[in-house]
Image (tube, helix red, strand yellow):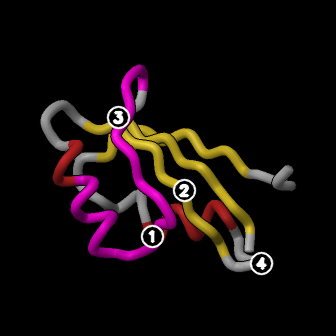
Amino acid sequence: MTCLFVQIRCRPGTAYAVADEIGLREIHSELYSTSGEYDLLLKLYVPEGADIGRYINENLLDIDGIERTYTTQTYKAF
């Protein structure tokens, strides 16, 4: 499994609805509200060998209220 962190910027007033929809999809390991440029921080695991861009597009980016995302791929845990 490949661990990803996705920062999510939501349209104003939609962060709770976006978080609720992510929760319903059960794709995340952890989900946090954050301060700063992005509203939510999502930790998820993508199956080994899966196309990460396609996985994000098909499972996350069709949620109404998501304005922008920033994805960080991890390689090793220390």
Which is more foreground, mark 2 or mark 1?
2
Residue 9 found in image quarter: top left
Give the CA distance from mark 4 to mark 2: 16 Å
Given the image, on which type of amino acid does mark 2 rest? Lys
As helix, strand or loop, the secondary structure at mark 4 comes to loop
Residue holding disc 3: 39
Are dots 4 and 3 in contact, CB under 8 Å? no
Task: Tell whether label 1 touches label 3 (CB within 8 Å).
Answer: no
Q: Position of residue 58 (x, y in %)?
A: 47, 70
Q: Is residue 5 positioned above or below 24 on the image?
A: above
**Residue stretch rendered in magenta on the structure:** 18-37
Horizontal placement of 5 versus 11: left or right? right
Q: Residue furthest front?
A: 78
- Residue underneath mark 2: 43
Q: Is 68 placed left or right of 15 in the picture?
A: right
Q: Position of residue 68 (x, y in %)?
A: 42, 38
